[in-house]
Amino acid sequence: MKRFLTTTVLATLAWTAVFADSKDDVKAAAKALSEAANYTWVSTTEIEGAQFTPPTITGKVEKGGFALVESERDGNTTTAVLKGEKGVLKGENGWQTAEEVRAAAQGGGGGGGGRGRGGMLLRTRLPADDLAKIADKTKELKEANGVISGDLTEEGAKEVAGRNGRPGGQAPEPKNAKGSLKVWLKEGKLAKVQVKVSATVSMQGEERDITRTTTYEIKNVGSTTVSVPDEAKKKLGT
């Protein structure tokens, strides 16, 4: 009996170690990416049942510096530059801060789409930083067939489903939130991330069921060039 119990305990500890190691691997890969001199990412989002497909976003970031984020739809490119918690958007009237974009949108003056693509770009989260936070809000992560995956906690699923801007954004708390995380590593380095979430959310006073899948692909680590216009730097106060 003692031998059986010992074997069972060892097996349980072994499985626990596997789960812990998988989460540690993901967080280590995210940290390594955040410490890289630069990298490029491409993100795509699919919303089940939506009448339109969100545009692909391409981002380039340098460590401790700027992030240049662009999206393209119907031949039109929208560009934002981020630095820390600040961001500026290129609109019809030149580079604008988030506050100026919102004011222009409320006044009907366009300004790059404060409630559309422009606002979305200004709310962009860097993949390396975001992944570490999401990994902390998974129940467990385990590796199978080259993919590390796991379900989000209820708190994590609510946070992802209810995102309405960068930290500090206010939105009604989602209901029935569920989510999952998948991570692909190549030689221990981050190659692709996929976050899927479903929930009932409040949109324009109505409750709607949404299922959203966002996929990030990481490219050109260490060989990305981030070229930021001087006008954008000036607007950011740098």
Image: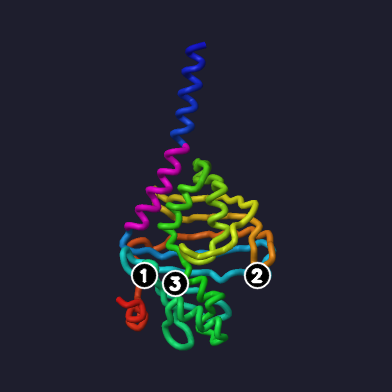
Q: Is 188 on the left or on the right of 143, as rendered? A: left
Residue type pointed to by label 1: Lys
Q: Which residue is mark 1?
A: 83
Does the stretch in magenta take in 48? Answer: no
Q: Residue furthest top?
A: 1
Q: How many marks?
A: 3
Rendered residue at 64%/63% (across/down): 202
Displayed quadrant of residue 210? bottom right
The kind of residue on which mark 2 rests is Gln
Which residue is under mark 3? Answer: 69
Q: Amino acid at mark 3?
A: Val
Label 2's element?
loop
- Residue drawn where x is 65% and y is 70% of the image: 204
Q: Determine the CA span between mark 3 and mark 1.
A: 11 Å
Boundaries of the magenta span = 19-35
Name the secondary structure under disc 3.
Answer: strand
Question: Residue 104: x, y in percent?
Answer: 51, 84
Q: Earlier in the sequence, mark 2 or mark 3?
A: 3
Work out whether mark 3 precedes mark 1 in sequence or the reverse, and give the earlier one. Answer: 3
Instruction: Please indicate, yes or no, whether residue 208 appears anywhere in the rendered image.
Output: yes
Q: Percent x, y for residue 37? A: 31, 62
- Above or below, comparing residue 221 to residue 101 in the picture: above
According to the image, label 2 marks what residue? Answer: 204
| 75 and 2: which is toward the camera | 2
Instruction: Give residue 237's quadrant in the image.
Output: bottom left
Decide if residue 25 is on the left or right side of residue 56. Answer: left
